[in-house]
Image (cartoon, rainbow, N blue to C red):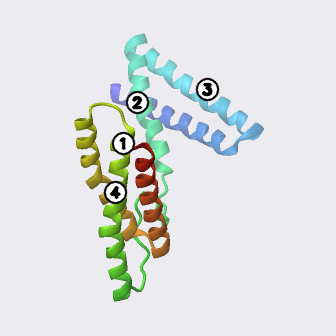
Amino acid sequence: MDSLWMAIIGGGGAAGALLLRRAWSARGSDGVPWKWLGWGVMFATFAVAMAAFGSMRGLFIAFSITGVAALAVVASGYELRRRRERKNRSLAPEPIERASTWWRGVLRWLLALPVGLIAAMGIGIFYTAWTGGAPQTRLVVGGLLIPVVWGACMAWTLADNRILRALAFLVAVTAFGFGLAIVRGF
């Protein structure tokens, strides 16, 4: 007998969820009657459960079964959509496929290795000259900063599609670092 009551409660929960779903899809004033009808069926289902199983046990059974029935109604409307092609929104996108020549490759590596090192040394010396603290600490931190900045300059130079822009950036960083280090002195 209990299974019959549970089937009635499940059917009432599913019917209430279907009516509420219809109210949601109608929207506006067209959905108001469906909304009242859906909530009425839900409350009637809870009243039947409380009458059949007692107040607290019936309320628990009604919440459990009605929730599962409503979830089944919602899951029945699931649509599997095709995935859209997304643009590359990576923070580090791959360099554009470019037709590379041997002289462009050599020029990129010459910019990345020695010119990038000179720019990194400028930043390290600038840091050493302009920060406070003991001279030994400033020298060590400035020296440890050079490989990090050099790696960043190399990565940026090799990934940039425009060689002249990379050259201008490295020259500007070098001038900035050494220029301000000279102004301050050690």
Instruction: Check contact, mark 2 vs mark 4: CB within 8 A.
Output: no
Q: CA distance from mark 1 to mark 3?
A: 78 Å
Tell me the kind of residue under disc 4.
Answer: Ala
- Foreground mark, 1 or 4, reads 1
Q: CA distance from mark 3 to mark 2?
A: 17 Å
Residue 88 image offset from top left, x and y in percent? 46, 64
SS class, disc 3: helix
Task: Determine the image quadrant of residue 117.
Answer: bottom left
Between 178 and 81, the one lying in front of the other is: 178
User: Relative to residue 51, is residue 133 depicted above or below?
Assistant: below
Q: What's the mark number on residue 120?
A: 4
- The residue labelled by disc 3 is 40
- The residue labelled by disc 2 is 65
User: Relative to residue 58, is residue 38 depicted above or below?
Assistant: below
Task: Determine the image quadrant of residue 184.
Answer: top left
- Foreground mark, 4 or 3, reads 4
- The residue labelled by disc 1 is 129
Tell me the kind of residue under disc 1.
Answer: Ala
Residue 56 image offset from top left, x and y in percent? 40, 12
Instruction: Check contact, mark 3 vs mark 2: CB within 8 A.
Output: no
